[in-house]
Amino acid sequence: MTTTITAPTRNIALVTARVVAGLLGSVQLAGATYFLFIAPEEAVWVNLWLDVPIVALTLSGILLKLGIAFLPGLSAARRIGMGFVAFPLGIVLTLVKITAYSESESLVFLVFDAVLFLLLALSWRATRR
């Protein structure tokens, strides 16, 4: 009698999304660390009422992306759910940073957030089958 063991299939879209989220979150964390702690005089600050929520939401989005990539033991559904929260947060923050802070460089992050969203949507679709 032969025993057949089938290995679980890997969700390639989710693995790729985790890599993209990890890279994106790491780069954003490095930028936030630089402008908050190393060279705050080089940062563009508008006013306290706008800057504090923007920094807090930016750090929240970064932590969500790093969580998608690195938190151990999370199910695929939770990782995808975290990504679906991080995506609109990243889009809104990027649009605010472009308009209020004149950071046209943020468009690059907008593109990577869209790629991350696409990968998460594909991985969600793969888990639904």
Image: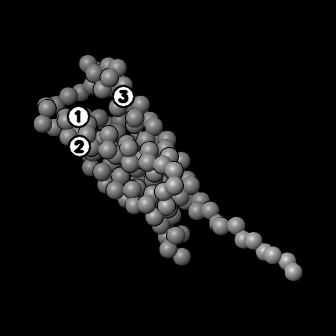
- For mark 2, give the secondary structure: helix
* Residue 62: x %, y % from top left: 37, 42
| Residue that lies at the very extreme toward the front in this rendered image | 1
Which residue in the structure is indicated by mark 2?
A: 96
- N-terminal of the pair, mark 2 or mark 3, is 3
- N-terminal of the pair, mark 1 or mark 2, is 2
Dividing the image into 4 quarters, which one contains the C terminus? bottom right
Contact (Cβ within 8 Å) of mark 2 with mark 3:
no
Q: Is residue 99 visible?
A: no
Q: CA distance from mark 2 to mark 3?
A: 19 Å
Q: Front-most of 103 and 92?
A: 92
- For mark 3, give the secondary structure: helix
Q: Quadrant of residue 96?
A: top left
- Vertical order, 14 against 61 (above or below): below
| Residue that lies at the very extreme toward the bottom in this rendered image | 1
* Residue 119: x %, y % from top left: 49, 58
- Vertical order, 46 against 74 (above or below): above
Identify residue type, mark 1: Tyr
Q: CA distance from mark 1 to mark 2?
A: 7 Å
Q: Front-most of 115 and 127?
A: 127
Which residue in the structure is indicated by mark 1?
A: 101
Left or right, 33 with respect to 49, comes to right
Contact (Cβ within 8 Å) of mark 1 with mark 2:
yes
Q: Residue at x 64, y 66 (%)?
A: 9
Q: Quadrant of residue 83?
A: bottom left
Q: Is residue 56 visible?
A: yes
| Residue that lies at the very extreme toward the right in this rendered image | 1
Which residue in the structure is indicated by mark 3?
A: 33
